[in-house]
Image (tube, helix red, strand yellow):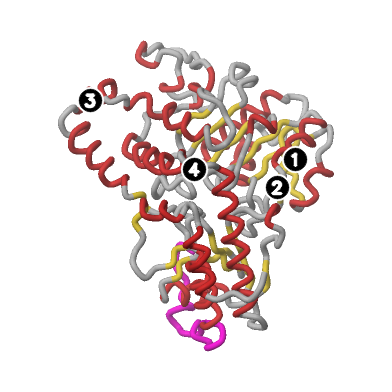
């Protein structure tokens, strides 16, 4: 890439076929927001939808809204919309609970389908909650299983005839390194293992085709690239060939075949419906649906193309403007191996990121020394990538990060 400047990035924005989508989001003036991989921006349609739900549906129609306004159908309806983003079919995805809880459900189910095998294989750098849930499940099952952790690039070679489940996050939360979903799935299944994907950093930014890959299970969250709001409910997908073969362990009343029969014994709902557990969080589901709707009219290939160009632009700008200032690229340089983020290491990563945020450039920090920047193709501009790189270079050149308030640790990083 030839030398960059802000004018060149502005020209890229002028040519961007997705540029108009930015107007569908609320973004504060003077803020460069590169943390949509942690919390997506607020869609402008969301406040009106929530107000309508609160004032008219809840306020006027009260409990009749479960039927009148289809509240009871929301987990499946929103799930069907998310299915279109991840290569799944109607009736294969349901929205419920959190990513962690959904992972527990499908991991338990997967182990029950492979009873002769006792190893859960994962990446050492997998997101910690996935590892914690596996550890907790192993404890509940009497320590009869084991969790084996290897480096990401060693996954395919580590799968063997003892492996019951391969559990991976598609895009690594720290580095943005992306697994080849189809190839790893094929490697797992060739050894008789089941494949479980966490799509938290993929859905809504990176094309995913679970059906074509023949994967077994997937989970993902609603508050990153799906723009569902803080703590938005998560989704779970189970390949149709598995849906009727077992009872998931959290057998709540709305996963029952006839929840309003109030029978004393559990009988699982058909298909993906058994993965619902408790009462749907209607307000959160409505916000998530508004976020997902923003994505449905955009071709996944177009999102990916812009995401790649944003990442390439940012990496090039940082390396051009901040050369020799202690940064090292952690993310894969090759776009086909990188999700929708770019991460750099710096020995003073925490105070550097706090100084950036104070200047209105919002990324985030991941221990021990990682500066992480996410690119949400629906609303991130090329000038945002330039402005963030230029601010980062200036902070490092001037030492502006080395102030007491920027060293003070906060509860959320």
Mark closest to the chain's N terminus, 1 or 3: 3
Mark closest to the chain's N terminus, 2 or 3: 3
Label 1–label 4 contact, CB within 8 A: no
Residue holding disc 3: 63
Mark closest to the chain's N terminus, 3 or 4: 3
With 56 as the anchor, is 228 left or right in this view?
Answer: right
Q: Secondary structure at mark 2?
A: loop
Residue holding disc 1: 184
User: Where is residue 70, by image quadrant?
Assistant: top left
With respect to residue 7, does 55 lie above or below?
Answer: above
Residue holding disc 2: 179
With 287 as the anchor, is 9 left or right in this view?
Answer: right
Crowding at dot 2, Cα within 10 Å, few <14 / some 14-19 / many 20+, comes out as many
Q: Residue at x 56, y 54 (%)?
A: 306
Q: CA distance from mark 2 to mark 4?
A: 24 Å
Callout in the foreground (1, 4): 4
């Amino acid at each position: 890439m030839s030398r960059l400047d802000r004018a060149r990035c502005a020209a890229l924005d002028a040519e961007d076929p997705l540029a108009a989508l930015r107007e569908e989001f609320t973004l504060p003036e003077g803020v460069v927001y590169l943390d949509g991989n942690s919390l997506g921006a607020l869609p402008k349609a969301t406040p009106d939808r929530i107000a309508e739900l609160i004032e008219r549906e809840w306020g006027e129609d009260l409990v009749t809204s479960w039927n009148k306004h289809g509240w009871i159908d929301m987990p499946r309806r929103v799930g069907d919309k998310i299915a279109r983003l991840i290569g799944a079919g109607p009736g294969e995805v349901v929205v419920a609970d959190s990513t962690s809880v959904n992972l527990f459900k499908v991991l338990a189910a997967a182990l029950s389908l492979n009873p002769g095998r006792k190893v859960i294989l994962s990446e050492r750098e997998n997101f910690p909650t996935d590892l914690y849930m596996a550890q907790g499940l192993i404890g509940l099952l009497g320590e009869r299983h084991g969790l084996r952790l290897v480096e990401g690039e060693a996954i395919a070679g580590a799968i063997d005839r003892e492996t019951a489940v391969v559990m991976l996050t598609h895009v690594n939360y720290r580095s943005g390194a992306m697994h080849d979903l189809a190839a790893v799935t094929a490697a797992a299944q060739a050894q008789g293992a089941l494949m479980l994907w966490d799509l938290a950093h993929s859905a809504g930014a990176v094309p995913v085709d679970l059906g074509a890959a023949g994967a077994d299970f997937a989970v993902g969250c609603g508050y990153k690239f799906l723009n569902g709001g803080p703590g938005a409910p998560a989704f779970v997908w189970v390949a149709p060939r598995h849906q009727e073969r077992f009872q998931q362990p959290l057998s709540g009343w709305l996963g029952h075949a006839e929840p309003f029969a109030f029978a004393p014994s559990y009988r699982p709902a058909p298909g993906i419906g058994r993965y619902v557990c408790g009462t749907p969080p209607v307000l959160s589901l409505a916000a998530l649906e508004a976020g997902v709707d923003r994505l449905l009219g955009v071709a996944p290939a177009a999102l990916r193309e812009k995401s790649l160009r944003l990442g390439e632009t940012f990496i090039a700008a940082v390396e051009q403007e901040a050369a020799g200032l202690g940064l090292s690229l952690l993310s894969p340089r090759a776009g086909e191996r990188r999700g929708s983020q770019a991460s750099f290491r710096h020995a003073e990563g925490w105070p550097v990121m706090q100084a950036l945020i104070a200047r209105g450039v919002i990324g985030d920090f991941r221990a021990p020394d990682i500066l992480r920047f996410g690119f949400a193709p629906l609303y991130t501009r090329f000038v945002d990538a330039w402005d963030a790189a230029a601010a980062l270079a200036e902070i490092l050149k001037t030492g502006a990060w080395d102030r007491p308030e920027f060293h003070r640790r906060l509860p959320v990083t």
